[in-house]
Image (tube, grey):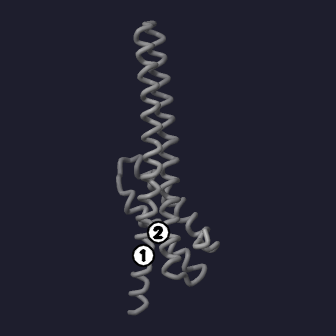
Amino acid sequence: MEYINEKMVKPALIGGVITGIITFLFSLIGGCCCCFLYTLSGIITSYLLTQEYLPSDRDYLISGALSGGIAGFVSWILGTIVGIVKILISGTVAASYMKAVGAQYYSSLYMESAEIGFILFAIILLLSFFISIIIGAAFGAIGAVIYRVVTEELAKS
């Protein structure tokens, strides 16, 4: 943690949370441009970072990766909440149907498939957690590097 400057945290949180929410909203409408948005997270964070102080190259990379990881986490947590709500709604509808039909065989079959479904859901949830954070951090760092290179080239002109 000695690499993280306290001046990096606020820009990383702002860039990460904003981009995480935008990424989640794009995923709701069927868009799949999370990598671009994670890159945008690094760019936003780098811009905010330069408003605070003159960062080093390492500061850009660390803050971009931190911001992208936060964006991945925020997007993941919002997607998880929506997924759980969908499962609860569909599970309640299916359980109500089984109760209305009154067939014991179907309800026991449903319970066994629900347990397997829960285990698979937990595994997918865990995998998607790590994938979201790793991809977010990687593309956030790329966004920070892009910002650094572009601003350096503009300064030379």
* Residue 71 vertical position relative to residue 110 in the rendered view, above or below: below
* Residue 104 vertical position relative to residue 28 in the rendered view, above or below: above
In the rendered image, which residue does mark 1 sit on? 145
In the rendered image, which residue does mark 2 sit on? 42
Q: Position of residue 76 (x, y in %)?
A: 48, 49
Q: Position of residue 124 (x, y in %)?
A: 42, 41
Q: Earlier in the sequence, mark 2 or mark 1?
A: 2
Label ID, residue 121: none
Q: Is residue 50 left or right of residue 97?
A: right
Q: Secondary structure at mark 2?
A: helix
Q: Position of residue 108 (x, y in %)?
A: 44, 13
Q: Do the numbered discs 2 and 1 sit on residues whose CB atoms are within 8 Å? A: yes
Neighbour tally class for label 1: few under 14, some 14-19, many 20 plus, Cα within 10 Å: many
From the viewer's side, name the closer residue of 2 and 28.
2
Neighbour tally class for label 2: few under 14, some 14-19, many 20 plus, Cα within 10 Å: many
The type of residue carrying mark 1 is Val
* Residue 11 vertical position relative to residue 22 in the rendered view, above or below: below
Q: Residue at x 51, y 64 (%)?
A: 67
Q: Secondary structure at mark 1?
A: helix
Q: Residue at x 48, y 11 (%)?
A: 99
From the viewer's side, name the closer residue of 103 and 62.
62
Q: Quadrant of the N terminus?
A: bottom right
Where residue 120 sits, quadrant-wise, is top left
Q: Which residue is farthest bottom?
A: 157
Q: Is residue 7 left or right of residue 78?
A: right
Q: Residue at x 48, y 73 (%)?
A: 61
The type of residue carrying mark 2 is Gly
Q: Position of residue 7 (x, y in %)?
A: 62, 74
Number of numbered discs overlaid on the protein picture: 2
Work out how far the residue at label 2 is from the one at label 1, CA to CA, in angstroms: 8 Å
